Amino acid sequence: MTNIIETKDLCKAYGSHTAVDHLDLLVPEGSVYGFIGPNGAGKSTTMKMLLGLIHPTGGTVRLLGQRMDARNRLDILRRTGSLIESPAGYAHLTAQENLQIVADLKQVPRKDIDRVLEIVHLKEYRRRKVGQYSLGMRQRLGIAQALLGSPKLLVLDEPTNGLDPAGIQEMRSLIAEMPRTCGATVLISSHLLSELEMIVDHVGIINNGQLLFQGPLDKLRRHSRGNILLEVLNPGPARRVLGAARISACDGGDPHCLQLPALPETSVAELVRQLADQGAGVVGVTRRTRTLEEIFLSLTESRKEVV
Amino acid sequence: MRAFLAEVQKTRRRHDLPVAVGITLIVVLWASASAPSTADERAAGYSALLYALPIMNAVVMPVGMAALASRIWDAETKGQTCKLLFTLQSRGSLFGAKAALGMLENLLVCGLEILAMPVLGYFRGFTEALDTRLCLWLLLCTFCVNGMLYFLSFLLSIRLANQVAALAVGFCGALLGLFAAFMPVWVSYLVPFGYYIPLSPVGMDWDADTRIARMFVRPLCWPLLGVTVLLAVILARMCRRAIEQEEV
Amino acid sequence: MLIRCILAENRKLHGAVIWLVFLVVPMISALYGTFNFLQNLGLLTFDWYNLWTQHTLFYTLFFFAPMVGVYAAYLWRLEHLGHNWNLIMTVPVRRSYIFLAKFLVVAKMTLLTQGWVFLLYLLAGKFWAGLPGWPPVMIVIWLLRGVLGSLGVIAFELLLAMAIRSFAVPVLVGLAGGVSGMLAASRGLSLFWPFALMQAGMNSNRKDDMLSGQFFPFLLACLVWAGIFAGLAILLLRARDVRAE
């Protein structure tokens, strides 16, 4: 599988402050990649560097198989759509006129305007001045601008910011369908993992400019298998079995409860069999599942914890 | 007072001071560059300067005041801070603070202009004695007309979010005011933008036959100054009302 | 591609308030000019040349450069507002074209302004002052020369409005520039100062041609100044990080 976005040691420093710190971002083709981190983690800065809006202080960017530099910039941008920070638009012009400006500059036929207006459900408001648009409508116009010319790569920076729940839902399904309907790869950022959980298949978690986790969502989910709580009648034999199996156990709050680390399913089954054989009297085995959100928080709170 | 201090805080990094000094600098450099050079003319140097400054003011100040006033309000428009401010302070105090800051900037602009006069005279070798009374008179008149135009621009900035309006009006006003000053005197009374000139302390007699210009001190036109102050007060009240009625 | 950029810039000017400035400034100038011309016939000769000086004296000295400042500041203000910088810098267009398109659009507006000035001059001369015959061809040439002379000012004002996010400053600097241009012209330094070039080209304060025999140095000066400022602006666009606020 080829990567549509590939950065190597990407850095951006403002004076002594490092906003992005040796970032190696890998976004596979056809994926919806969630780029997640708290506010100020370096998401927008990274996305702006990908698009050539700001200049990296170190490292390289490859987009769509080409190195992002002065020579390839236009060629890359022609095949890219983006929405950075809040949406842009000229307030004194209508949506139609705003899209015409972008369509002309992207060398896209005017017909395409109808298509993107249809996708973002703005067709009936096309003749209204953008100054009179609500935030949600502007956001959708921003998406429409990005979709003009059916780009191979979409870079969307917090596109659901300021939308109401219905709007968020709509935006999500719109974005989730992009790889299928438009054949596009999507890089989408958010400060909430829960918001993207349903639509992304890959995630990168960033904090303080550093990438803490990157990979398929499944892999992150696998880590969400949390500790195991073991309830036994006889703690003595239970501890012996655990010691022999080299599984560290700690107190689970009451003498009959033991807390075990996350273990694969097969090991759990084997462990239960041994405990029963040794007369530990297993009363209950509970897996304490961590939500993705908890993982995200633990990742971003202290970067020492390794998933 | 606290409102005023908050207003002063907002000027940080807005570079109001360079803009205000820049306005004066345009006038002073212009006056300096067109200052007389022959000995005869230098003997009437200050009179000529007192005659020329109001004309230069009429070109520069309407645009300058529009620039200052629109910047002071545009900060709120750009930051969309009105909805916050109106919950923190009374609207009247917001107006008062902005008006006070604006008038201070105005005073700085015309004060610097007057202070620059003796400096200019020194370097250009004027031999005429400087009449302090006339300087104060010029200061008073420039301040009042500036103030009036400041509140006009301020009003436009509040009512129309687009800064272009205040600047464009200031700029067209300057053009009109300058022209009005060279028309029959009653025309110049109709265009407040150019009041600098009918209020100027020094007049000029131009004899078309001999082609000789003679400067003379003229009495201060109190009624016109009164009208200026009245207009300024009316415009200021309209600004206050505009802020009070502003919907956020 | 440059054509498309220009089309986009043109579209941004739809329904823009600066057209009002475009209409009003030359009108005030024409009204006053004709009035003054008729008032001072004792000093002035009753001909098209003298009407020309009255029409364009103040306009070229003080009000042309700030007017270009208004045009330039308006075009960049559109990008400074919202997050439009992100938009224009991610469209697949060379950064130099973004600036050049704005430059050509302002130049076009200047050309239109000159046309409007000429129309007003013609109407005022023919129907108000009742001048005999038609204006000399030289006048049209001077107007076109004025456009050439304005190129340096246009590039400078666009550079300023791009770098400074304030609407007021370019207009104010334009005013200062106009004054400085007048002073430079009075010292015979017209060709060395961009703000004086427009005034020299327009030949606004005298009847005899200020540029007789100097057209090519004039043209060169116009292009050099415009080139310097446009070059600086494009360099800045390439080197600077985009900061939308």
Image (tube, rainbow, N blue to C red):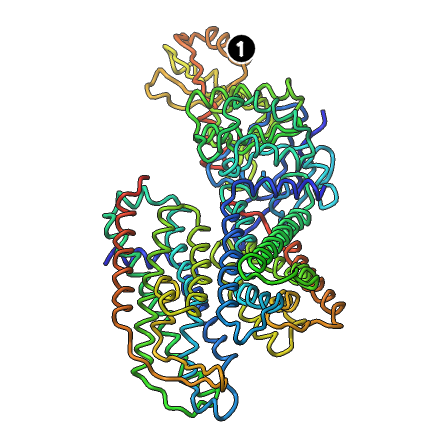
Going by the numbered disc 1, the residue's amino acid type is Glu
Instruction: Tell me the residue that label 1 is attached to.
Output: A270
Q: Position of residue A265 (x, y in %)?
A: 54, 13
Is B158 positioned to the left or the right of A224 in the image? left
Category of crowding for the residue at label 1, using alpha-carbon neighbours closer than 10 angstroms: few (below 14), some (14–19), many (at least 20): few
Is B223 positioned to the left or the right of C202 in the image? left
Asked which quadrant contains residue A220, the reply is top right
Which residue is depicted at the point 52% across and 68% down?
C37
- Visible in this render: residue A154? yes
Is B70 positioned to the left or the right of A95 in the image? left
Q: Chain of mark 1?
A: A
Q: Position of residue A301 (x, y in %)?
A: 45, 36
Q: Position of residue A6 (x, y in %)?
A: 67, 35
Asked which quadrant contains residue B67, the reply is bottom left
- Visible in this render: residue A246? no
Query: Between B130 and C101, which is closer to the camera in this rendering?
Result: B130
Q: Secondary structure at mark 1?
A: helix
